[in-house]
Image: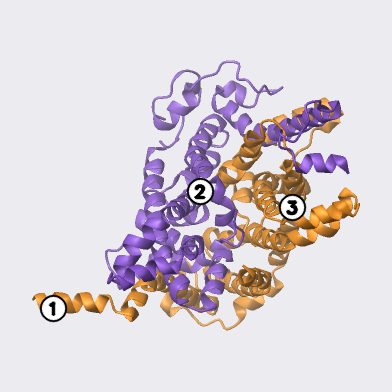
Amino acid sequence: MTRMVTESTPSPVTVAPPVPARLYVAGALRLAVAAGIALIFFLPVLWMLSISFKPPAEWLEYPPTLWPKEPLAGNYTFLFNPGNPEGAIAVMTGAAEPVVPAFANSLVVAPLATLLSVTIGFLAAYAVSRFHVGGTFMPFFTLTTRMFPPVAFAVPLLLYYSAVIPRLIPGLRLYDTRLGLILMYVAFTVAFALWMTKGFIDAVPRHIEEAAILDGASRWRVLFTVTVPLVRGGLAATTLFIFILTWTEFLFALIFTQRFAITVPVQVSHYAGAIGRFYGPQAALGILASIPVVVTGYLIQRHLVTGFTFGLVRE
Amino acid sequence: MQNAVRRLSRWINREGVFKLALVAPLQVTMWLILIVPTLLVIYLSFVRWEPVLGDWTRAPFAGLANYAHVMVDARVWETLGRTLIIVFFAVSLEFLLGLALALFSLNTFPGKRLFTSIILYPMMLPWVVVGFTFYLLFLDKGPVNYILIQLLGSGGAQPWFKEPPLAIGTIILADVWQWTPFMFLILYSGLGALPKEPVEAAMTLGAARWQIFRLVTLPMLRPVIVIALVIRALECFKIFDLVFIMTGGGPGTSTESLSLFIYRTGFVYGQLSYAAALAVLLLIAISLVTRIAIRPLEYREEAR
């Protein structure tokens, strides 16, 4: 029982100078366990990182070694210049595509879809928070759209994009275009944006807005000069969270792009499918594809729970 | 002219116009990208149409034929069962491991911040990257088999992607690796937010650690646990990317998930109206499940 007390109040000040030896042992034991767990979580990606610096001969070498014997950056340069492979990678010639267009597409599609989604979601969230627009149906509706498997929507959307829209609006191309992907991503992330921003708006006391209205400011003015600055941090967190969702999205991008609007996740799968055992460049691409979202994820670490649970659980 | 501007400004500031303008963009998006396609998918499910058959508006009415086909198609029920198995094992493991990690992290030890940062990153990775990573790990001559051979001798190596149960196991492991951090994060923050008094009271009454956990902490944590399980299970049910990258549904169709099956039916085999019937049934099922599952969530919303 005494052990529990020392554990739940671990501040160093309360621990008397002669620390019992068993506390050191317990601490060292925990550190060892923690290191082991962290290693298990870290190793898979460490292995991919290792492959991404290995020449072709080492990709499937047995016994496998974690550290490349002849480390090289060829897998990375190859991604951007597949026509002119350097050194050891030159063994693998073939029909590899350059990844620059995929990165260009992702860098346009993900941020634009994110901004639109957060804007639309924020405005609606403001209405839900302040005027209870939509009642109880709206929460259920948005939650359900989020829980629906995207493939179920892909079926009609393909018909919609390739047959309905071209007939209604000639000249508007949505299949295999960035615009088509952006619209889809907005529709499927707006529920997240709504619920995440609603939490932040709810936290702003109404009387601040009411005071501004009494001073004669219009509704719009209050929204943009009083509320928006107060929820700036929340909007930033929501934006970064939605960016993670749109950057990593795979199914829609796979179905609704063919040549011109391919995104990074689809490109990762292309290296696996089209060329077979092209592990080195694919691992390099996987690392490059992960960097933006991992960095973003750490920036909003505090808000990840809020995001993934629709604000039902907050930190 | 000035008068008109003033009138316009008064108009856009009217309460009703303001409210309408706030929700209009969401409504337009929902109608264009969600509701119209939903109506389309219902229409498609009642006709016989494939892209090669020409104009979709003149497709012959098929009645309930597509739905009847779903009922007798063994592959539907196999993929559904398989998906539920994946959900069950993946989410249970994620929950248990996440809870263990959360309880472990309540202790203090040097480098704790670094520790939590390291175990969080898998959930930020793109699915396809996680799939590819685990594909590399479980290759015949990959590191996992190497370690197994070192531990168990030459019989330790397994043909991971050639035996269906093993292949499903690798998919579950990849999902567990990626989403245990989510369970950890949600349970850890839930544990941190619990009131301290009940635990302290139980301690002064002389309760054992396990008793306190089971009878005091766990019941208080219940709402958070329910939310975590519901959200993760619904999310995992959609599993597509991992299967697509790691096994492609193979060998044969033995590791196909429901999403992958519908994807193939509609977009590889081109049977769009059959895929539409599957989609409609899936949408109905998910709505019902969400309707039931949302109850504890609504309760929590009120309690807050």
Of pointers 1 and 3, the one earlier in the residue sequence: 1
In the drawing, does residue B245 fall left or right of residue A1?
Answer: left
Q: Which residue is at 78% across, 28% downward?
A: A28
Residue B297, percent from left and from top: 65, 68
User: Which residue is under mark 1?
Assistant: B4
Name the residue at 74% across, 62% down.
B222
Q: Which numbered marker is on residue A248? A: 2
Packing grade of label 3 (10 A; few <14, some 14-19, many >=20) is: many
For discs 2 and 1, the disc positioned in front in the rendered view: 1
Element class at badge 3: helix
Q: Secondary structure at mark 1?
A: helix
**Contact, mark 2 vs mark 1 (Cβ under 8 Å):** no
Q: Is mark 1 in CB contact (under 8 Å) with mark 3?
A: no
> Same chain, marks 1 and 3?
yes
Report helix, strand or loop for mark 2.
helix
Residue A13 appearing in the image: yes
Q: Residue A160, how many percent across, how many down?
A: 41, 69
Residue under numbered circle 3? B95
